[in-house]
Image (spheres, rainbow, N blue to C red):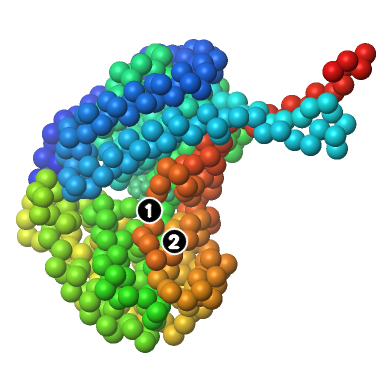
Amino acid sequence: MAIATISPVTGELLMSFDELTPEELEDKLARAAAAAAAYRLTTAEERAAWVLQAAERLEEESDAVSRLITTEMGKTLHAAQDEVAKCVRGLRFYAAEAPKFLQNRPGDAHSVGAKETYVTYQPLGVILAVMPWNLPLWQAMRFAAPALMAGNVGLLKHASNVPQTALYLERLFRDAGFPDGVFQTLLISARRVEQVLRDKRVAAATLTGSEPAGRSVATIAGDEIKKVVLELGGSDPFIVMPSTSLERATDVAVKARCLNNGQSCINGKRFFVHADISEEFIEMFVAKMGALVLGDPMDAGTDVGPLATESGRSDVEGYVDDAVGKGATLLVGGKRPDRAGWFYPPTVLTDITPDMRLYHEEVFGPVAQVWTVASLEEALLIANGHPYGLGSNLWSEDDAERALFVRDVQSGMAFINGNTTSYPEIPFGGVKRSGYGRELADLGMREFMNAKTVWVGESADGAS
Ligand code: NAP
């Protein structure tokens, strides 16, 4: 894939970039390794000051950065502004909280015959981050903020269609005062990830993206015995029970499916609605999905912008056509508009069956599947039959239903009466084919740290 900014609104090539030459890549790796040796010796307070400086700058530059994100991948400007604000919040969170996460964890010295025992958290070194375009700033930031606070050094291989955002991130951290080489962007194609990951100077990797990319990186990391965190796809269930407010549940259902133009791993993608309320739910949901304004993402009145790439739109169309061809009922949308750019309308399908591709896969666009179910147990049975297990949603006022949902839903995150969202303060991640490991909060930061056990015996002369 060419490394270039191509407007999703017009299809026009706006800016293209040359890949790093082998010599330039070697220079970046050497600088990262040299930086890691010195950066691990900095104090948490020094690192927090740089992270706070990055937050200040990003806040000041928020307008231009939001516009850049919208230009490169087509999300609405207000969604891009929210994304930038979340990054500022994430940076400030780690600057404030990471020093606590880095404190030693004391153990029970007496039971292991020691004078003292504790776990101390130390950085691993150079970490490679392979990131997707859908939240081009936040996905990278939720790696970078904890990694840099931990004393690690970052190498970012961003998606090829967001090169300007990728370069902005490198500039942001450099201008915030981080030492040379602590955070670098690598403009390389996906096929060169293997070389970087196998390089002895690289300690570990994190990948957010599709299942095939995750499998490839995990295979190489396994071969090299290097730690890897995978944040992959999702087809999150959104379960609506009779005790909830339908007005609220349908409002959030629309948001859940169409946020980020329907291109988020944690979009609610499969809606399971109890039979007692399904007719009313479907009527309200379809009306609200159909009323969304599809248009230029820079316009304040636009609800849904174009999909990010031409191939992404073809994929979405392929899923819908396949389902309709096999008997799914199309209630709204389902037809690309007659205009330039990679637009696809909010779409609702019912009568989904296992022979349809979208039953088992992920549709990365504003296409909702609605099931009518007789019980929460039935909803969970179908929901858990999917290979992915990232987020999940329940709308219910019933304590027993909530407890059953938390116990039995196969997902890394369970949200009740609220939309699935990533917050710096709480862990994020999935199970099954959605990947492994966690991002954010203390757990995310510790993924790329050596939890070193220290055991100190009594001195030979008995002195303390
Ligand atoms: P993708 O094709 O997997 O791309 C993601 C990144 O991986 C890009 O930087 C890409 O580089 C690189 N890449 C692709 N193939 C690779 C390979 N074989 N080896 C190494 N690197 C490779 O993903 P996408 O389709 O752009 O993004 C959408 C997917 O990401 C969806 O499945 C979505 O659910 C998932 N996602 C998950 C999360 C989460 O937190 N769980 C968050 C956001 C998105 P190039 O651009 O150069 O190809």
Q: Quadrant of residue 347?
A: bottom left
Give the distance between the C-alpha atoms of the residues marked 1 and 2, in whole angstroms: 9 Å
Q: Residue drawn 79% across and 37% down?
A: 108
Contact, mark 1 vs mark 2 (Cβ under 8 Å) = yes
Residue 56 or residue 383, whichever sits in front: 56
Relative to 389, does residue 147 appear above or below in the rendering? above
Looking at the rendered structure, the secondary structure element under dot 1 is loop
- Where residue 235 appears, as percent x and y from the top left, is 40, 61
Relative to 191, does residue 237 appear above or below in the rendering? below
The quarter of the picture where the C terminus appears is top right
Q: Is residue 427 visible?
A: yes
CB at disc 1 and ligand 1 closer than 8 Å: no
Which label belongs to residue 296?
none
Residue that protrudes farthest toward the front in the picture:
464
Q: Residue drawn 44% across and 29% down?
A: 95
User: What is the total number of numbered labels drawn onto the structure image?
Assistant: 2
Q: Quadrant of residue 69?
A: top left
Q: Residues within 10 Å of mark 1 (few under 14, many from 20)?
A: few
Q: Which residue is mark 1?
A: 421
Q: Which residue is mark 2?
A: 415
The quarter of the picture where the N terminus appears is top left
Task: Say whether residue 258 is left or right of residue 276.
Answer: left
* Mark toward the start of the polypeptide (1 vs 2): 2
- Where residue 373 appears, as percent x and y from the top left, is 41, 82
Please state the quadrant of the image where ligand 1 appears: top left
Residue that protrudes farthest toward the bottom in the picture:
276
Relative to 317, does residue 250 appear above or below in the rendering? below
Relative to 335, does residue 282 appear above or below in the rendering? below
